[in-house]
Amino acid sequence: MTFKHLEPQDYKYLYRITAEPTPLKSNCGELCGSACCRPGQHGDLGMYLFPGEEIMFTRREEWLVWEEHDPGDYDFPASWQGPVYFVRCNGACPREMRPLACRFFPLAPHLHRDGRLQLIYETLELPYRCPLITADNSLDPGFINAVQQAWQIMLVDQRIRDLVEEDSRQREEDELPVVPVFY
Ligand code: SF4
Ligand code: SF4
């Protein structure tokens, strides 16, 4: 596999293919009061952007607060050069602008040792309960396909692949459940 860095046109494409699909055909936010969009008790919940994803924003969005982090201070692979952007939203984004992390949730990529990509339910410890993870709901196939397609593109970027590799090995070390997504 030839590795490259994702370019602005790649992010535009990723945003396009993940724009419409949602985990369920109905609005899953009605199951939980949109738990994953709440800013958290101390307003500190947010998400990291992938390297170069910041090109999709003007940084003047009123619904986003930006922080620049040094990847060396956090748990990022050595291949990540600074800064890394951490964004916190006010819980009411224009849907077409939501970051990739929001578009993929509640799915996460798991890279097996043989290089095989498997989409699984997110195993990160979360400060809220997502019923799509805890209640074994089957997800919309269009959503799963879009997320799968997006990750196949993203894993061509060595930095992102390093992150997914490290997360996958850590998940195995921690003996967290690698539960394939249900169709
Ligand atoms: S927490 Fe889960 S069920 Fe609730 S809005 Fe987020 S993805 Fe949907
Ligand atoms: S950016 Fe939008 S989708 Fe993502 S957590 Fe905030 S409100 Fe929810």
Image (cartoon, grey):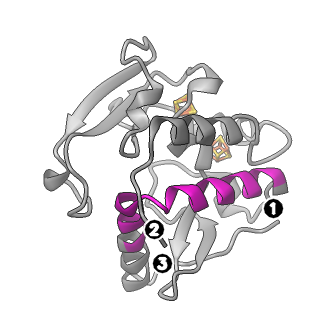
What's drawn in magenta, residue-wise?
Answer: 142-165
Provide the residue designation for mark 1: 138
Q: CA distance from mark 1 to mark 2?
A: 34 Å
Q: Position of residue 131 (x, y in %)?
A: 68, 53
- Helix, strand or loop status at disc 1: loop
Image position of 92 with respect to 28: above or below: above
Taking the image as shown, residue 91 lies to the left or right of residue 21, namely: left
* Furthest residue toward bottom: 114
Dots 1, 3 in contact, CB < 8 A: no
Which residue type does callout 2 highlight? Thr
**Which of the two discs, 1 and 3, labels the residue nearer the N terminus?**
1
Q: Which mark is residue 2?
A: 2
| Classed neighbour count for the residue bearing mark 2: other residues with Cα under 10 Å, few (<14), some (14–19), many (≥20) | few
Which residue type does callout 3 highlight? Leu
The image quarter in which residue 57 lies = top left
| Classed neighbour count for the residue bearing mark 1: other residues with Cα under 10 Å, few (<14), some (14–19), many (≥20) | few
Q: Position of residue 14 (x, y in %)?
A: 60, 42
**Which of the two discs, 3 and 2, labels the residue nearer the N terminus?**
2
Which residue type does callout 1 highlight? Ser
